[in-house]
Amino acid sequence: MTRRLLFAVLTTAMLIGLGYAGPLRAENFSETASNFVDIHGNEAIRTFGTVDRDKRYARFRKLLMNSFAVKGIAKFITGPYWKKASSEQRRRYLARFEDYLVANYAAKAWKIDKVRLAIQKVVQGNATDYMVSTRLIIPHKDRDIPIGFRIRDTKNGPKIIDLQIENASLIITFRSEFMSLLKKSGGDFDEFIEVIVERTLKLEKTAQNSQQNPQAAAQ
């Protein structure tokens, strides 16, 4: 529960491929970034606690598209292979990647009783972004998890450009996984897309089986 909930309280735009539009409003963006994380982070937690699968999927998909630059993530984690892909391959990949993210983090309803995200501090990282440090409070796990959200002001409003758990970037981890898949396929983008589809179906099946097991569902 912890790792997926963390990412999804999340899952994240990119330092590369995310355009910055105009001068940063330094005098008020610190507060904007803090409020953005507070609102969307806790909204994500509520979303993952939604029992009805269809509603949970719809809510998370909307949150994902509104809060993260999905295309920027998708481009970054495929590295140089993105440029080699055709327009049609990119289109299909983006659609399947979105499905994969939804299944990866919303296929199963989580136990969220009294789980919340607490803002700790906001620090300006550079001329274009801020790091919002938080703690994910999980009473039934009897622990708090430190999470850092790196927020950038874009032409479409604030976006999360990285998520760090105990100083480890989940974007970099994600890139390593996808680059490995592409290398194994010899750079075949169509084969890579099929692997994503297979993984998505497997995630959904595993979550379905877990939800049918009362003991697993209670975890």
Image (cartoon, grey):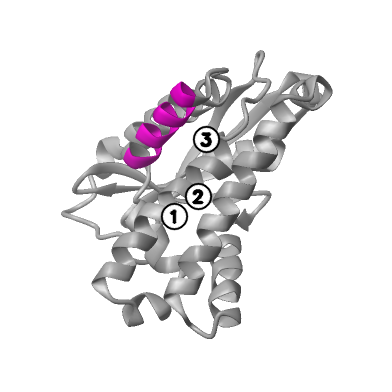
**Residue where numbered disc 1 is placed:** 97
- Which element carries disc 1, helix, strand or loop? helix
Q: Residue at x 72, y 33 (%)?
A: 209
- Which element carries disc 3, helix, strand or loop? strand
The residue positioned farthest toward the top in the image shown: 113
Q: Residue at x 30, y 41 (%)?
A: 158
Q: Residues within 10 Å of mark 2 (few under 14, many from 20)?
A: many
Q: Which amino acid, by three-letter code, is at mark 1?
A: Phe
- Judge by depth and name the residue closer to the eye, 206 or 77: 206
Spot occupied by residue 11 in the image (x, y as percentages of width and height)? 50, 46
Answer left or right for 109 relative to 72: right
Which corner quadrant of the image does residue 168 belong to? bottom right
Which corner quadrant of the image does residue 206 belong to? top right
Spot occupied by residue 193 in the image (x, y as percentages of width and height)? 46, 65
Q: Residue at x 46, y 31 (%)?
A: 57
In the rendered image, the quadrant that contains the C terminus is top right
* 159 over 170 or under it: above or below: above
**Residue where numbered disc 2 is placed:** 100
Query: Between marks 3 and 1, how big is the CA–CA gap?
Result: 32 Å
